[in-house]
Amino acid sequence: MNISYDNEAGTLYWYFVDLTEGDAVEEYECPVSLLCDARGGVVGIQLDLSEETDTTTKVKFALAHPECQWQTTNQFLTVAIAPHASVVPLAEPAILDIDSEGRILGCDVADVDHEKKFRYQRLEPHFVAIEDPLEELVALPPMDEAIVLPQVERAGVVAIVGRPNVGKSTLLNAIIGQKVAITSPKPQTTRSAIRGILTRSDAQIIFVDTPGIHRPRNRLGNYMVAQARQAVPDADIICMVVDITHMPNELDERIATMIRRSRSPKILVLNKTDRPNPHAAECLAAFRALVPWQMEIAISAIRNEGVSNLVDEIVTRLPQGEAFYAADQITDQNERTLCAELVRERIMHLIGDEIPYGVAVEVEEWEKRPRHRYIRMTILVEKESQKAIIIGSGGTMLRKIGSDARPAIEATIGEAVYLDLWVKPRTNWRDDPSALRWLGYRNE
Ligand SMILES: Nc1nc2c(ncn2[C@@H]2O[C@H](COP(=O)(O)OP(=O)(O)OP(=O)(O)O)[C@@H](O)[C@H]2O)c(=O)[nH]1
Ligand SMILES: [Mg+2]
């Protein structure tokens, strides 16, 4: 295996063989993710070959060095030097080098963010110098400090599932004590599974907040529901959150059917108990009948009532195990994603009707300047007419979105921020596979 990193160009070169000039005769672009360990160090890459017509041949011929574990599932080629804890999709595709027999020799991955999380220390023993003197291999910054994992008796993953708008993300934030997931009165706010990590002296719990399970009407919806479904089999404990002020509907029944298949303990979380509810007894009986629950607990996520009891009950049911994350890590999302989400949250709150469902926000620039961090984001909408609504007359709405989001962003990154928002239409992006991939809405 032959790995190098050009610090200046921010490009990672990962070759499965020792290349000689002329070996590669063809190039091919494909989506790529970095595989990271619990500390955010890069330990592998994952190439998405699903769009390549001749994938099977190429995968069959993919060469692997004895040191790397490699597996191909669902048209993914995964190459790692150590077990990974998270998969981080990159915006830029990987460029694959293919030889005359169609074998993948390796790839280069541009635009790799090395500033904070994605460090290359674990790869360093595999690094080789780049021979071309013009492409000097710059020494990598060392990790700030060795991260010590906390000593705990129990550790595990808890999936938080439920239909849209029942308060799953509000619950996650209450548990973690900080905003790690955006919330809004509109259903389908959460789009991707989000990890919130709670470390106590006795246990580390990795909560996975999931998108509300609904009937999808586009590819984005398919992605969201798949994200929720995927969280269930991986979970050591499943919390189904319900809104106790409503009777269970067909979606609750579908979710119940899905979680019944799991052998993990299942907890019924009855949320919104702060609301008046004359039919509470009836609703409770109906929810109890859905699944053979290990326990049930009534909470008000918004008032943080019953939440610590829920956490205590979860800890007693966690398997014994070692911590996975450093004690101060509270989420697996990177700062940029979280900041883009905070802008989307403001849009969910400020803009009516269907428009927010067709909005995506991406960070285009993230630059440290003398007095502040300059952050440029694009708000993607589906139509020109929606662009006008987001901007508002004389730009008032866009300014309002920015001024509402900025304090939350500053609190998250701990720096003064200059937020520069732009709006761009991209027709029907929610059904456009390449746009979805670009925005990071793709399943592993
Ligand atoms: N009254 C009351 N409202 C709550 C409570 N928990 C959440 N909410 C509100 O319910 C709405 C939906 O909350 P979210 O946390 O975004 O719900 P979600 O289940 O994550 O929704 P999706 O991400 O769309 O699946 C928001 O307006 C919350 O403020 C609660 O305990 N009581
Ligand atoms: Mg949510």
Image (spheres, helix red, strand yellow):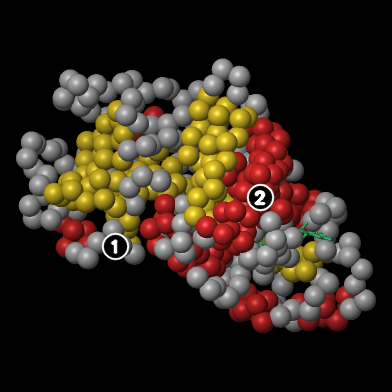
User: What residue is pinned by disc 1?
Assistant: 51
Q: Secondary structure at mark 2?
A: loop
In the rendered structure, the answer to whether residue 47 lies left or right of residue 83 reads: left
Which amino acid type is shown beneath numbered disc 1?
Answer: Glu
Give the structural element (helix, strand or loop) at label 1.
loop
Residue 135 in view here: yes
Locate residue 247: give its quadrant.
bottom right
| Residue 420 horizontal/vertical position (percent) | 57, 36
Q: Quadrant of residue 336?
A: top right
Quarter residue 44 falls in: top left
| Circle on res. 392 | 2
Name the residue: 72% across, 72% down. Answer: 293
Q: Residue 334: give x, y in percent of width and height.
A: 54, 40
- Residue 227: % across, % down: 52, 62
* Label 2 Cα crowd, 10 Å radius (few <14 / some 14-19 / many 20+): some
Q: Residue at x 64, y 27 (%)?
A: 415
Three-letter amino acid code of the residue under disc 2:
Gly
Q: Number of labelled discs? A: 2
Q: Nearer the viewer, mark 1 or mark 2?
A: 2
Which residue does the image show at 80% across and 64% down from the upper left? Answer: 271
The reply to whether residue 153 is in sight is no
Q: Is residue 178 left or right of residue 255?
A: right
Mark found first going from the N terminus, 1 or 2? 1
At horizontal 80% and vertical 51% (from top left) the residue drawn is: 308
Left or right of residue 65, residue 378 in this image: right
Looking at the figure, which quarter contains the N terminus? top left
